[in-house]
Amino acid sequence: MQPAQKTASTISPDQAPVDPKTKSSSSVEDNKEQFTDTKEPAVASLTLEEILAYFDDAKQYVDDGHRNDWDNYFKVYMGKRVFRNYEGVSDPVIRESHTIIETLVANIASGNPKFHFVQTNEEQAQDTAVLNEMLDYYMVCNRMALKNQEWVRDMLLYGTGILGVEWRNGEPFIFNIPLRDFFVDPTSTGLVHTLNPARYAGYEYLQDKDVLANEQIFDAEQNKWVPRYKNLDKLKPQDPSDSGKTGNSKGMDKAFKDMFAGSTLGDKAVENQVHVIKLHDLKTGRIYEVGNRKEVIYDQPTWCQREEMTRTVKVPGPEGVDIDMPQKLDEIEPFLPFAVLRDYIDSSQFYAQGEMALIIYDNELLNDYEAMQVDNNAYQNTPMYWVDPQFADLIPEIETIPGAVYPIPQNAMGSIERPQLSGDLDNKEEKI
């Protein structure tokens, strides 16, 4: 469960909500999730058609250019041939790229990532030990040692790795987002610190309909827990006419596979499964979720923002007595809760290139040379014969078998001469 997706506004302790049972105001700390108010968006909420248009534009941009490269990188990494310059009898594979990638992962992403908070102005507390210990605790809870490896591996393989951050069960939840499931404003060149930052980003995922129906959030206006998702009862299989509007050029069976993208289970197992598109939009300052491309099931102000507010803090006063002082907290404008790790960055491109983009062709050339080596050894160690045409009917019986006897005259059959095996291929492989 998550706290209400509201933006904070200034509410003094005197305005704290009154507990209907005790008829008394609760403390600010105990009820901080309730001190929220809806911030009017800059523009109205996006419509279902606009959300799907953003999603389809972003996916089409990837499908037309990047996805085929990503697929090839993964295949070669896993030992599958992609680019063949030599079609031989044998088909050996040297997984050199796998060795290189995993060596880099082990050297770059071993252990938990470490960073700490420090005081940056006089209004902040000097002692950050508790805050840093809490951060370290959250890192352990999120198993960041493993997630960091996946993050770095995606960066090395595809050029870009994505981490998402949400708030679940009272603490930050950090998770890896597969690059194929992630989508971003295709006109952008980065999330931040760029002349053209992304206006929107998000990801798609699969979830059981009952799980979505049981998830709740706290509504500060109603002062109670309410269902997080709406319109779940309206979700139905897609119309086949939607097949050309998915932003996917894989030629999938649109009516079913767009709805259950990526599922490998049988029909019965996925009957209750929902394909969800989750979009973070900065212009409207809202988070949207769409189920089965049919209904908007979630539409709320993003939690990734804060209005300017003032709170009362205690500071050391004269004679060792603490005094209350107002503290102003600056506004935090809406931001996208994704951590993007990029390898070889092009300033005009959002998606970067990884190590596989550099070594994939060398690895495939190495496989070609190895195939030549195996074929050459086979030719040397497995003789080929010529036979007098008048004994052609016996050809199916002739094999390279020790002790074999063939009813053919001595000069009617012989082995074909072959050139000596050159060491040049060894040198070429060693050079690669």
Image (cartoon, grey):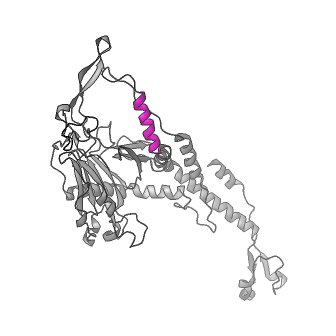
Residue 48 visible: yes
Q: Residue 36 appears in which quarter of the rendering?
A: top left
Q: What kind of secondary structure does the magenta stretch mostly adopt?
A: helix
Q: Is residue 408 above or below residue 261?
A: below
Q: Is residue 135 magenta?
A: yes
Residue 199 lies, in percent from the top left, at: 26, 45
Magenta region includes residue 118 = no
The percent position of residue 396, horizontal first and vertical second, equals: 71, 84
Drawn side of residue 421 relative to residue 260, left or right: right
Image coordinates for residue 217, horizontal then vertical, percent: 27, 50
On the picture, is 334 further left or further right than 431? left
Farthest residue, direction front: 22
The residue that appears at 20% across and 59% down in the rendered structure is 49
Closer to the camera in the image, 358 or 234: 234
- 96 and 396: which is toward the camera: 96
In the picture as drawn, the residue positioned furthest to the top comes out as 319
Q: Is residue 287 left or right of residue 365?
A: left
Name the residue nearer the viewer: 65 or 343: 343
Camera-side residue: 344 or 303? 303
- In the displayed structure, would residue 83 be above or below residue 130? below
| Residue extent of the magenta highlight | 123-143
Left or right, 373 with respect to 31, comes to right
Q: How many marks?
A: 0
Q: In percent of the image, x 28 and y 58: which residue is there? A: 56
Residue 134: image location, x then y, percent: 41, 35
- The residue lying at 30 percent from left, 58 percent from top is 214
Q: Is residue 186 visible?
A: no
Quarter holding residue 305: top left
